[in-house]
Every structure is written in C-alpha cells, then in structure tokens.
Image (cartoon, rainbow, N blue to C red):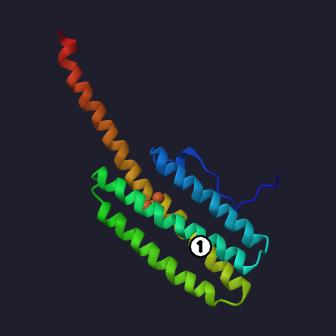
Amino acid sequence: MEDREWEIRWSDSLSVDVPEIDAEHKQFVARINELNHAIVDGRDKATVERLLDLMLMEATHHFWHEQRLLAQWKYPQRVEHTAKHAQLTAQFDRIMKEFEQADVSFTWALKGLYIKQLLVEHLLREDMKYRDFLRQQAKSADCRSEDRRAPALAH
Ligand SMILES: [Fe+2]
Ligand SMILES: [Fe+2]
C-alpha cells in the first residue's frame, strides 16, 4: 500500500498506559484516518459530516470517561484538563456550525481537518501530562514498596 504521509499510525509512544483509554484513543486514530481518507478521496459533504458527527459523539463520551478516571486517580491538574475538554467541545460546536454553512468543498474540508488536528494535539499535549503523572505515581509506589521490604531483608 502506498505510504500516505497524512495517515496517523498508532504507536506505543501514544499509549497512556491505561488499556481502556488507549482503546478509545486507538479508535480516534482509526476515525481520524477514516475522515482523512474521505476528505482526500473527495467524498461528499454529507459523508464527511456523518464521520465528523460520529467522531465528536465518541469524543464527548471519551472526555467524560477520562474525567471520571482523572478524579479517581486524584490527578492534580484534573480541573484544568476538564476545562480543556470543555474548551475543545465549544470549539467543535463552533467549527461544526461553520462546516454546515460552508458551501465550497475546500472550506468545509479544512474545517473537518481542523477538528482532527485539535483532537490529535490534545492527545499529544494534554493526555500525555496525566500519563507522566501516572508513571511518576507508579515509580514512587515501587520505591515505597522497596522501602518496606528493606528492613525485612536486613534480618
Ligand atoms: Fe484522551
Ligand atoms: Fe483529555
């Protein structure tokens, strides 16, 4: 298959080490590629709109799911992260309105690509921050359990 530079591939570097969230992020990557294909292949506006609607519906559910986990993990920046989700959702609503009003295919295609870009940027910038927090937590938990083992080893 021809190598298409606009395709996103899932790699371990995108993992946040939480299987249920990784599964949803993988689904985004698949949706994003589907959307890219539709736009690049010149599919009609209704088809692209259906794909965008689906992607945004899944994004809403994913944001809610992530926020519930961030609260469970007591992630210190969860309020900021939730605000970023709300900001993205508002941006998506605005872009979708512009998308609906755009007549020229070039214009609505760009709107579709912009939504995709915002989602990818959020994953790479914001979601990676809680991944780093979780890794840090796991590391200090390891250190604590080694501390507890130390006296036992001394006997
Ligand atoms: Fe996410
Ligand atoms: Fe997020």
Location of residue 69 in the rendering, given as x and y in whole percent from the top left corner: 36, 53
Q: Please indicate whether residue 34 sits to the left or right of residue 96 in the image.
A: right
Instruction: Please identify the quarter of the rendering in which residue 105 is found.
Output: bottom right
Q: Residue furthest right?
A: 1
Residue at figure coordinates x 75%, y 59% from the top left:
4
Residue at figure coordinates x 62%, y 86% from the top left:
100
Location of residue 124 in the rendering, given as x and y in whole percent from the top left corner: 49, 58
Location of residue 58 in the rendering, given as x and y in whole percent from the top left corner: 53, 64
Q: Residue furthest top?
A: 155
Residue at figure coordinates x 42%, y 58% from the top left:
65
Instruction: Please identify the quarter of the rendering in which residue 126 is found.
Output: bottom left
Q: Is residue 126 visible?
A: no
Q: Secondary structure at mark 1?
A: helix
Q: Please indicate whether residue 46 sits to the left or right of residue 121 in the image.
A: right
Q: Is residue 87 visible?
A: yes
Residue at figure coordinates x 26%, y 25% from the top left:
146
> Label 1 sits on what residue type?
Asp
Instruction: Please identify the quarter of the rendering in which residue 12 is found.
Output: top right
Residue 56 against residue 110 in the figure, above or below: above
Residue 8 vs residue 49, the one in the foreground: 49
Residue position for label 1:
53
Quadrant of the image containing the C terminus: top left
Location of residue 113 in the rendering, given as x and y in whole percent from the top left corner: 63, 73
Q: Around disc 1, counting alpha carbons within 10 Å, would you say few (fewer than 14), some (14 to 19), or many (20 or more)? A: few
